[in-house]
Image (tube, coloured by chain):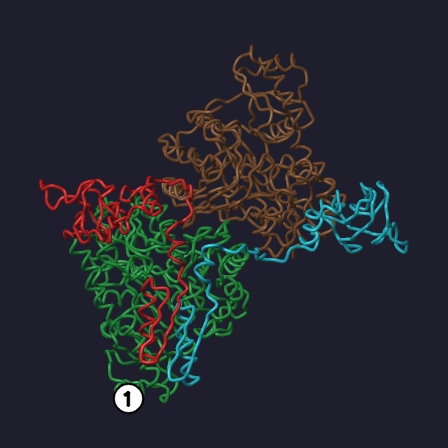
Chain colours: A cyan, B brown, C red, D green
């Protein structure tokens, strides 16, 4: 078969529902496999990731971190009780309340969430070691968004 | 050019999606808000941005003013659309928005304050020469005084909250002997709902029609009406099915009532989109009841017959733009019917719950659907029970009825009980088809009236 | 086979429900696999509790009998190859071709399905005992509707 | 009173549902047919009755005449609506229906026979004084003869099947040297598709618009046109997006072309709903191409701007009722656009397959959806690749474009690739927005033309 014949064959095949095509002839072997869904695949649709018409706003914590914190019982997630802007420092130029590795008492301030010009101090509800800081300084956070993962110390 | 560039939509469900559509057509960006239970809701998926503002109870999410404003602040929204219900008629919320430099898409603060006082609003409108029902135009808090007043008005009477909207607290009292009990129940109900136990009492007009006029007015005093809607088919003072035009309307009466509606709006310097509600009795006499200072659930029937996008007008007016429509531009074309599909038990008519298992909204020519329902959506006590609105538009009322019947027969909604069958029954009822409806119409289909 | 013959073959195949085709002839080997959903998946749709706006037409065999016949390997279902009216007797007043309990040879006439005034004899494709008659005499039947269950006799 | 009481709908998908809706409005009962793979399809669920007529391949189900007629017989259907495609233009099928005493909802047998012969139809219409493209009006089966004739016509030329509908066999040939290859390929293609290898050859008009007129005609010779549709945006001669009115149309040209369309229909004694297709070049010259003797996929844009239910007219005309619409009653209002949503790979533009995982048809004012799609529907090689039609209607073309953009942005369709994004790109294209479209427009979006 010439290259032309092969491309013609492919042009033809893609108008059909043929998924696999194999031909052995005069010492030639041709195999064409298309990426059509298989019958089996159709019967058990794979979970479909929803395609957003528009990008979601950055306010949300990424699902990965959300899953990690809820599924992993080693850590306790500290989440935002309000909607506002996340700040790690008590004031510009001051050092952050905590860093990864800091050990905090229950009731210690972890960060500020500013909402409507009010600086709201967010406290840890557990004694532990800060394992992860999930939000960048100055980023907006929504209600319930996880801010920190804290590894409890008994 | 509009000043409004990004709108935070402080509601959910079908009306949130309705607002997103018009914002998109106007080139305005949208921010959806949601409770933790509604992160996957369609209004969240379809808005440009979204912010979770609280747990499922609406008091802690859609009614939580600090979180709503925090969401507006972090997303840079320059306006808030309150939808209907929720905070839409809250002068306090509008004031906070104003103080934060955020445009409240609705009437002025003064309008909201006055409309929140039904007795006062009634008095102002009455003084402008618009007929009102006999009644006591002031707040009453003493039961004995209320009974004396009611006897003066003449039974049956209607007891209603002096502030707040919707059907809360409404009680019909037919005999003086039943008055005190009803009064106390209404007072408790209203106190729980609005934190204000004042009531007003007025004549209850039996077998009247509920007819309302859609008004558009700007701050310069220009105002037009977009004709009327008939909303007589109600259960427990909640509208179920609406139409435009009203079957009992004549061009002369429409001109007169439309004039009265504009007069009522002018009397309170109303600016924005609003609805002036009347009772219309069998003799063609009409009485002002109240004015709704928000977009109404049933606005699509007006849009279908006038071609005016009421939400677009609302946003433009809130943005300070002058009204661009003149009364002579408003022409009514055909007939439109809206059926509200509620999550409701078909026997008890109580709210129903479940998960949407199968959903097919009706389609085709002249059929409009307003719904944010999706397969797998949970419908819980915290959800909006209004699942969908189906609107049919055709050249004549019989043609619109025929179209609505076909649409309701086509509609598929499985997974929880709804009032879809009730609507099918209404559309098949000979009195409905002949246009013989009064406020007691729905009682024939059982359940509490 | 010429290329032309191969494309003609494929054009023919895609009008059928053939999923896989393999041919070895005169040193040639040809294999064609289509992306049809598998028959098994189609034959057993998940039971759906759909509320019909209108009652379904009586033409369909009831789902119960359909399930019985496909799930129960003791029986072979004889289904209608066409759309028409089911008759148990060769002519009015004549005795039925078969009754429950009748033993039939493969190829024996079981009933008539009349379509467009033509009397089509439906034959058993197995030797066996008639276990169940699934359609009432004179009722309409649709394509693929099960008419009889036959218990094969080896 | 109509004689037709029960219609068997010999098709599936969106058009089957479209026909069910109009039948319901007319009080006509409906019978759906399906293959064994489509027992759960929405047209089956929503029809009054349904009959399974064969295995998945359409040749053994929707094209199987004996089983279709068996289904009509057992259900007592007195008419068959063939939809579009499938058997809709088959004179043989119409004849069998006629012989069985079943009304074929379409034009007369003679109409179908004549339209099935494109060369002959072209000749008859040309003789009536309607301009046609230069070409060879008769069937040609010899390649050398065809090349001689093509050279006389002048390149580029279009080769098409003498019988059959749709894009099968269509080939554009730009140079004489390419002619013979193209001719043989087209002949093979056409023979496979229609069993008739005759072709006709005509001038290929580059950069022209495809403009068609919707015709209604009764057997007494009364005929009207419902204005035009612009269907220039095509890929491989398949329409993708249609509008009404056409951007290049003037009232004078519409009157002239409408007259020509009616003249073409009258020349063949056309009775029923049909479409006269023209090419319109940049200089305003128009040429008859062919007449479609069926309802067309794009009929909703005409319905939106005229308010006429074309399927209802079709059923009434097939039922022998006289045409009730006069030309002066036909008024065009606003602008309508239709987007055909196909199961199509966005890169290769080849058919795509899958299972519908999530589906939200757009809603709201001025948006019409024609679709029978449901979550979990399988889309296989045997399915109709046309998943949905979205139609937007507004007062002006820019407003209709804005509305369609919002609708397409709102639409959710997951589980298989579709051309939804292609439509979003078209609606954002500056040339489309300015109305500068020609038949080569879609080539800018990649894929084979």
Q: Nearer the viewer, residue D50 or D398?
A: D50
Does B308 sit left or right of D294 as displayed? right
From the viewer's side, name the closer residue of D229 and D115: D115
Image quadrant occupied by the N terminus of chain A: bottom left
Q: Chain of mark 1?
A: D
- Furthest residue toward right: A94
Which image quadrant is residue D179 in? bottom left
Q: Position of residue B165 (x, y in %)?
A: 61, 31
Relative to D239, say whether B108 is above or below: above
Q: Is residue D379 left or right of residue A114?
A: left
Which quadrant of the figure has residue D113? bottom left
Q: Residue furthest top?
A: B177
Q: Secondary structure at mark 1?
A: helix
Residue D261: in sight, yes or no?
A: yes
Q: Is residue A78 left or right of residue C32?
A: right
The vertical placement of B350 against D177, above or below, is above
- C62, B75: nearer the viewer: C62
Q: Is residue B439 above or below residue B181?
A: below
Rendered-image quadrant of the C terminus of chain A:
top right
For the residue carrying disc 1, how many other residues have a C-alpha within 10 Å: few (<14), some (14-19), or many (20+)?
few
- The one nearer the camera, B257 or D77, is D77
Q: Which residue does the numbered mark 1 point to in the structure image?
A: D148
Side of A124 where B382 appears, left or right: left
Q: What residue lies at 43% left-to-right and 57% top-to-bottom?
A: D388
Residue B249 x/y as whole percent: 44, 35
Q: Residue furthest left?
A: C93
């Amino acid at each position: 078969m010439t290259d032309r014949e092969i491309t013609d064959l492919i042009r033809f095949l893609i108008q059909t529902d043929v998924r696999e095509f194999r031909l052995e002839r005069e010492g030639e072997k041709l195999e064409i496999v298309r990426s059509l869904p298989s019958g089996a695949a159709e019967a058990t649709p794979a979970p479909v990731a929803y395609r957003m018409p528009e990008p979601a706003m950055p306010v949300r914590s990424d699902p990965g971190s959300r899953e990690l914190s809820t599924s992993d019982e080693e850590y306790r997630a500290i989440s935002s009780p309000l909607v506002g802007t996340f700040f790690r420092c008590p004031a510009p130029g001051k050092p952050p309340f905590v860093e990864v590795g800091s050990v905090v008492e229950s009731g210690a301030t972890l960060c500020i969430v500013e909402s409507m010009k009010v600086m709201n101090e967010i406290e840890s509800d557990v004694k532990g070691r800060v394992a992860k800081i999930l939000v960048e300084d100055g980023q907006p956070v929504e209600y319930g968004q996880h801010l920190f993962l804290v590894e409890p110390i008994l | 050019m509009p000043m409004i560039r990004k709108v935070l939509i402080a509601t959910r469900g079908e009306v949130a999606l309705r607002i997103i559509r018009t914002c998109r057509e106007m080139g305005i960006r949208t921010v959806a808000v949601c409770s933790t239970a509604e992160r996957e809701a369609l209004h969240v998926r379809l808005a440009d941005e979204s912010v979770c503002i609280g747990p499922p109870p609406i008091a802690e999410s859609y009614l939580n003013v600090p979180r709503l404003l925090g969401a507006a602040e972090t997303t840079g929204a320059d306006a808030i659309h309150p939808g209907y219900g929720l905070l839409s008629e809250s002068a306090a919320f509008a004031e906070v928005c104003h103080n934060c430099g955020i445009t409240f898409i609705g009437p002025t603060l003064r309008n909201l304050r006055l409309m929140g006082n039904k007795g006062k609003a009634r008095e102002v409108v009455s003084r402008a020469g618009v007929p009102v029902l006999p009644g006591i135009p002031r707040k009453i808090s003493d039961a004995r005084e209320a009974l004396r007043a009611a006897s003066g008005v003449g039974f049956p009477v209607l007891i209603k909250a002096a502030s707040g909207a919707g059907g809360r607290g409404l009680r019909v009292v037919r005999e003086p002997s039943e008055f005190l009990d009803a009064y106390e129940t209404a007072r408790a109900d209203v106190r729980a709902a609005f934190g204000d136990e004042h009531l007003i009492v007025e004549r209850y007009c039996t077998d009247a029609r509920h007819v309302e006029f859609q008004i558009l007015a700007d701050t310069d005093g220009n105002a037009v009406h977009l004709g009327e809607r008939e909303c007589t088919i109600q259960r427990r003072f909640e509208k179920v099915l609406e139409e435009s035009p009203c079957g009992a309307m004549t061009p002369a009466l429409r001109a007169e009532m439309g004039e009265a509606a504009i007069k009522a709006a002018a009397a309170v310097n109303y600016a924005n989109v609003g609805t002036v509600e009347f009772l219309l009795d069998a003799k063609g006499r009409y009485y002002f009841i109240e004015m709704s200072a928000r977009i109404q659930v049933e606005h699509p029937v007006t849009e279908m017959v006038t071609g005016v996008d009421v939400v677009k007008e609302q946003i433009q007016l809130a943005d300070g733009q002058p009204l661009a429509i003149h009364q002579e531009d408003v022409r009514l074309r055909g007939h439109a019917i809206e059926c509200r599909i509620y999550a409701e038990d078909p026997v008890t008519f109580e709210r129903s719950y479940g998960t949407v298992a199968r959903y097919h909204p009706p389609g085709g020519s002249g059929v409009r659907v307003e719904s944010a329902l999706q397969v797998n959506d949970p419908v819980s006590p915290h959800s909006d029970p209004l699942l969908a609105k189906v609107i049919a538009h055709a050249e004549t009322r019989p043609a619109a009825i025929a179209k609505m019947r076909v649409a309701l027969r086509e509609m598929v909604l499985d997974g929880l009980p709804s009032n879809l069958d009730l609507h099918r029954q209404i559309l098949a009822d000979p009195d409905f088809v002949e246009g013989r409806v009064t406020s007691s119409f729905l009682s024939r289909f059982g359940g509490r009236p």
